[in-house]
Amino acid sequence: MLMKYKYAWHTPGHMGGEGFLKSPSGTAFHKFFGEDVLRADLSISVPELGSLLDHSGVTGEAEKYSAKVFGADQTFYVLNGTSTANQIIWRSKISPKEHTLVDRNCHKSLNYAMVITDAKPQYMVPLRNKLGIIGPVDFSTFGDVKCPELIKMSALTNSTYDGVCYNTEYVKNKLYEHFNNLTALHFDEAWYAYAKFHPIYKKHFGMELPAQDIPVFCSQSTHKLLTAFSQASMLHIKLPKTIATETEKKRFHDLFNESYMMHGSTSPQYNMVASLEVATKMMEDNGEQSFRDTIEEAVELRKKIVTLKNDYENEKNPEQEKKWFFGIWQPTSIEQFDTEELIHNQKLWVIKKEDKDEWHGFDVDDDYAMLDPIKLTFTCPGINIEGDFEETGIPAAIVTNYLIDKGIVCEKSDYYSWLLLNSLGTTKGKQGTLLAELLKFKELYDGEALLEDVFPGLVAQYPDKYKGLSLRQHCQKMHEFIKKGNETDDMLKMMDDAYNERPEQKYTPAEAYRKVVKGEVERVELREIKNGSSRIAGVMLVPYPPGIPIAMGGELIGSNSGILDYLLLREKFENEFPGYESDIHGIERIEPDNDGMKYFQTFVIKSNYHIKSSHEFKKY
């Protein structure tokens, strides 16, 4: 096909790469990516490729192939990530003012889906342990949902960022038990596209559910842990069992496609489409073996970390302060079983209620979730599973900054834990480098290495804060700050309290967003709210860690709320430890004042609008 259309007169303008050769910069680009990649960047005008929007030609055939391999009735290729897949799903099922149930531990794209659809969301409450790790949803809180008969649709994150995977049959039964007018179930499986291809995940992914009376949707970032190009995702559908004939299937497809076309481009990147089909073919050819190997490598790494930790803690070293190493958040029995059994025995990874105090720390009532072996949450010295702080500690942010400087990028960092993903592309060489750098960090810490030798750039940028400190002193100073928090509580306790607070919802997220569009919002500093009156958030606020919304647009932020207190403590932390700023969606930092302090500010709804609005959120 690349040769057949070498005399094309259509888009894209570079014409198979020829256009890049007209300038030195373009030639460098051509040389870097290679001729085949550029010649494969073809137009929708090429007839054999078909249309992604009407799912014709080879593109449509590829989607049907993926549906068969991934266990779906219908599959749609989405080229702007699972963020867009989530929007498509919700646009297809929810109308303005309809009531929905959303995992509070969800990606912000689902919160934006509430904005797009003008839904009235209520939230599933995730559990959290004393380490700050987010656990499964507490289904006992379903009894607190107002007007359960009005709930139309649910969205649950599966798996969570730390690898908590739900038994989807259990989830479905719990939802049906409380909400009898659901029109769809949605599992956001962005980080979990591989679950179909190894028996360790049996009954723990959406497409394994049998056909229901309502459709089941799964959105998957095929690029995250499979081999598709970035942004290339799939949207899988299990059709209702009432849809049996080809005519009924086509009608469902055509109606759903109206929502799909709202978010799709008429100029799709066919390289991305091809990567989705190749990712599918790889899973059909040897997906189970590939993930068996991936799980084996993850299990072996888990065992190595446990062995190192045990060796250091039990060695006959008179220097007690050197008897430490990093840990792994996992069942304590892992080291007792051989690797082969850990690869295949799902029961060994189940989060059991009786194991709360041993390892996971969640108040679960039933055994309805498991830990994904390939998602590795490392733990640091400083706090135990009961939430008791140790005298000395090593905050995770310092470790992950060190690893980044060595070319090792972590997926997520919390206060005393960080997440690494063991995927198809992970090699034993990468694992060896990781272990070597963790051991080097321990050597630098134990040896009282100066901070300017460990983080020269950090010290050069902020000499008044860090010059002359050793790595150990730096870790201890940050540890003491986290332990102290404010006068009464530590930072993790304040974070937990903030996330357990349920702000009053004055507007739906969509109504709040319309205030943003109309300019009926203003930026205020958080300290102004603390010293004044309560305000209504104009946008969602999502601190990292832990990366889930602490407040949604339209929710009331009280001047005495735990949410505000936690965000102000984060502000204080950043001023105390410059260079360790974390992303907080919805927060802007104003320039330092004369004392060098930075302050958080956010959009709130102007006070002269929130009383007069005709769209004010009415109580259930």
Image (spheres, rainbow, N blue to C red):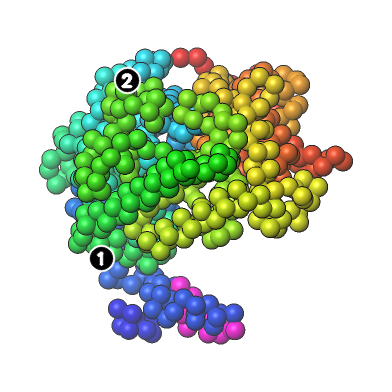
Where in the figure is residue 177, as x and y percent of width and height? 26, 19
Q: Is residue 16 magenta?
A: yes
The magenta stretch spans which residues?
12-24
x, y percent for residue 111: 48, 36
Residue type at tag 1: Val
Frontmost residue, 523 versus 460: 460
Task: Give the answer, above or below, for where 483 lies relative to 67.
Answer: above
Q: Which mark is residue 365?
A: 2
Give the residue drawn at x 66%, y 27%. 484
Q: Callout 2 environment at 10 Å: few (<14), some (14 to 19), or many (20+)?
A: few
Q: Nearer the viewer, mark 2 or mark 1?
A: 2
* Side (left or right) of 192 relative to 437: left
Q: Quadrant of the N terminus?
A: bottom left
For numbered disc 2, what is the local secondary structure?
loop
Q: At which x and y percent is residue 307?
A: 39, 46
Lower sequence index among marks 2 and 1: 1
The amino acid type of the residue labelled 2 equals Asp
Q: Residue at x 48, y 43 (%)?
A: 316
Residue 78 visible at all: no
